[in-house]
Image (cartoon, helix red, strand yellow):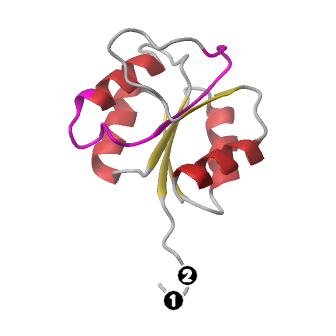
Amino acid sequence: MPDGVAPRHRVLVVDDDLDTRTMTADALGDRYHVATAATVAEALACAAAERPAAIVVDLMLAGESGWDLIRSLREDAALRAVPVVVLSATPATEPPTGIGPWAAYLTKPCPMGRLREVLAALLA
């Protein structure tokens, strides 16, 4: 990497809707190395392999929920400190018992500029 150019952080985007996943990844791709996943299983495998600096997750996934993903991340010693940004159509509520806090909660539809601002602040 050339001098003076900061390395780009890895961000994992988890959403079961292909259009939303693609739009979010495209909006972040100029600033971050973006990986995507559609399911909790895919997200956990990707997080273990890629070690993202942050994870953006929808709560309403097919099969298991985003809450299940967050719970699994918090139970994994290698991943528990990774900040999670919830990006969901579900209004913010208290997380279910046993799930640690999220770094930010954004409600869809969310301007992608706002998501970029939140990630920039988290990863500064």
Percent of width and height locating residue 124 = 54, 60
Give the amino acid at mark 2.
Answer: Val
Name of the residue lying farthest toward the bottom = 3
Which residue in the structure is indicated by mark 2?
5
Real-space CA distance between mark 1 and mark 2, rounded to the nearest whole angstrom: 6 Å
Judging depth in this view, the residue of 29 and 85 nearest the camera is 85
The reply to whether the magenta stretch includes residue 53 is no
Give the amino acid at mark 1.
Answer: Pro
Disc 1 + disc 2, Cβ < 8 Å:
yes
Q: From what the image shows, is residue 75 above or below residue 1?
A: above
Percent of width and height locating residue 28 = 64, 53
The reply to whether the magenta stretch includes residue 84 is yes
Residue at the location (48% across, 60% down)? Answer: 9
Percent of width and height locating residue 30 = 66, 63
Which residue in the structure is indicated by mark 1?
2
Q: From what the image shows, is residue 22 above or below residue 97?
A: below
Residue at the location (35% across, 43% down)? Answer: 47
Q: Give the range drawn in magenta.
A: 75-92
